[in-house]
Amino acid sequence: MGILNRLNDPTEGGGIVLATVEDVLNWGRSKSDWYLQFGLACCAIEFMAVNAAHYDLMRYGIIFRSSPRQADFLFVTGTITLKMAERVKRLYEQLAEPKYVIAVGSCAASGGPYWEHGYHVLKGLDQIIPVDVYIPGCPPRPEAFQEGMMKLQAMINQEAIFNKRKRVAEEDAKFKNSNFAESPSDIQIKM
Amino acid sequence: MQAKEIYDVLKTEFGDRIISFNDSAAGDPFIEIQSDKILEISLFLRDNESLLFDFLNSITAMDLVDKLAAVYHIYSVSLNHRIVIKLFVPKDNPKVPTVERCWRTADWHEREAWDLMGIEFVGHHNLIRILCPYDWEGHPLRKDYQAPEFYHGIKVN
Amino acid sequence: MGEKKKVDVEYSPFESDKFRVNIGPQHPSTHGVLRLEAELDGEIITEVIPHIGNLHRCMEKHCEFKTYPQIIPFVDRLDYCSAINNELPYVMGVEKLLGIEVSDKVEYIRVILSELNRIGNHQIAVAAFGLDTGAFTPFLYLFRDREFIVKILEHCSGARLLYNYFWIGGLARDIYPTFKEDCLDAIKRIRITNAEIMDLLINNKIFIVRTINTGILPGDVAINFGCTGPVLRGSGVPFDLRKAQPYSIYERFDFNVCVGTGELGTIGDSWNRNIVRMNEMEESCKIIEQAIAQMPMEGDVREKVPKRVKPPKGEIYSCAENPKGELGFYIVSDGTDKPSRIKVRSTGFSNLSVLPDISKGYMIADLMVTLGSLDIVLGDVDR
């Protein structure tokens, strides 16, 4: 009787799977993440090694793009300085929704070794843009990059698509109410 | 050529413009000169047949609390010897003639010294900040520097 | 009602106007966060202004608040492609101030690891230069073989990229038993790959046409701009600090100073700068082989150094031949356990300052080739 019978029969016309639209879309999105290539400092060299033959990040379906318009998420690899912070924020704003951010290394997480007297270092990427996954280390090992990548894929897999706007609004409200210096939308861009 | 011999050559040429030869402390000896004569001395160092200092390693700006210092590390590729030239300037009016005409690499080194320590190089063609943003305030490597709390709305410390 | 005036406008069909293009700081071929402002006349570059400082991490300010051993990790992070090479001039300078002599075994290990890291750095440089000119395969081959070097350094120090392995008065810990065999294995692999890279990239017709006669830097201009390393040697000036003022134990080894000979193109162009790097890898292999043959395995790797390192009052300029050129540390000690000033004479800062001069008059597409051949690392340029 139509489609359900064919699903139960493995030999004749099988291979049809029933799933929610959300699951299928999430599966597709999480397995073909394209990131914006954006090397900042030391972690970028390790990131090059992750992309190269030995660790081969591409087998996760992750391909680099040079333009933020074509990318799904942002790998911020390295120290962000104040001169650079406004540009990082602008690149983040140029990414198309849905967008994610991975902060790589202790510099992107908190300022790293430069937190104490770094008059020109941003003390943590989350001061300017929301971060989804942090990868610790100075620099992180390639295995840590892979783990962080899988964390992001797991996050995308569980994401609600149809309640997206609600979720984004909730997150924005959370971000605004937290005790950051200023909310990200208030920061002026001067290039 | 040893540092002492170079000092003797400079002393006979420039007389009391060369203040002292200092090799008492540990490490490298240095020659102290009057701050307004650096360009003439550098041109002499570069063009003299027995010196031929054609290579400027770096210009260091130092904060000695009561005054500022500029230190020139100079090397000769052809004759393979080094010398350190040091000069002191007062903190309220730190002005040094530029040596950009002598070694073109001095362009960026002087901009860095201006940016981080606030030594003004008179005659430099484009003395603007190089490492810090162009609208940065203050000279960060001075000992009494206070980092700003906010920069363009981003919290610094 | 006013009268309408007739306006004659003559358009010249070939009149051109200069315009400005912004490249970076987020650009795949700027090797980091460099911003270039190029003024173009059609496709011809009339002016290039580099805007640096996007990675200014206040290293010199931090050094004033840290003790001498604590500074070594900061030194690693200057030129992060060759961290071991950065540590060498710094620890040599502090040891010279303190009057410490390290044992022969330590010197040999330092030389071997420095040369290994020099090869690793040149592999990154050639790979990135290949990427700039549109060749992706050499990148995969070179990074595959760089892993062998990284493995050795990781086995010694515990870290893959930033090592903190050379300490004042010796090394952090002793090498492991199969160190010599691993180094010889790595050299064997490097030689095989380098022969492949010569065919695949360096003598490739497309690569040659893109790189020869671009960004020509004459030797005297290079010296006047303070260029060192492969950039200076590519211009035909045989200046290498390892030969000119031998530090550590480099006078015990037999090796050549590679210079650009202009066998293809002109002396001082991008291709010649790159061939110097390829030849230097072979010279480094030779040094490592000699050092492994002479190295004693017995002995301690730490000299007696007091827990609080307090050099006497004084100042020193300590420099060494980094893969990218002369890296110098001007260390001013005021007799306490923290330096009063540390100035880094970085290689990239001087090497990059020549870019506006040598890229003028070439096509915009050659700008990235010229920049790639200078092999800058922004951590080193901005500090």
Image: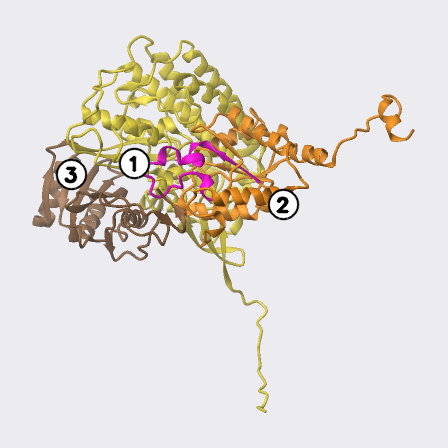
Chain colours: A orange, B brown, C yellow
Residues in magenta?
A: A100-128
Pointer 2 and pointer 1: residues touching (CB < 8 Å)? no
Crowding near the residue tagged with mark 1, few <14, some 14–19, many ≥20 C-alpha atoms within 10 Å: many
According to the picture, the residue beneath numbered tag 1 turns out to be C62
* Disc 3 element: strand
Left/right of residue C180 with respect to residue A3 in the rendered view:
left
Q: Using the rendered image, report if marks 2 and 1 lie on a common chain.
A: no
Q: Chain of mark 2?
A: A
For residue B110, say whether it is visible.
yes
* Disc 2 element: helix
Crowding near the residue tagged with mark 3, few <14, some 14–19, many ≥20 C-alpha atoms within 10 Å: many
Amino acid, disc 2 = Arg
Tell me the CA gap for discs 2 and 3: 68 Å
Q: Identify which residue is drawn at 36% across, 44% down.
A: B156
Task: Say which quarter of the image contains residue B61.
Answer: top left
According to the picture, the residue beneath numbered tag 2 turns out to be A165
Pointer 1 and pointer 3: residues touching (CB < 8 Å)? no
Image quarter in which the C terminus of chain C is found: top left
Image quarter in which the N terminus of chain C is found: bottom right
Crowding near the residue tagged with mark 2, few <14, some 14–19, many ≥20 C-alpha atoms within 10 Å: few
Q: Identify which residue is drawn at 49% across, 18% down.
A: C188
Q: Chain of mark 1?
A: C
Tell me the CA gap for discs 2 and 1: 44 Å
Tell me the CA gap for discs 1 and 3: 26 Å
**Residue C350 place in picture, x, y as percent:** 35, 43
Task: Say which quarter of the image contains residue C77.
Answer: top left
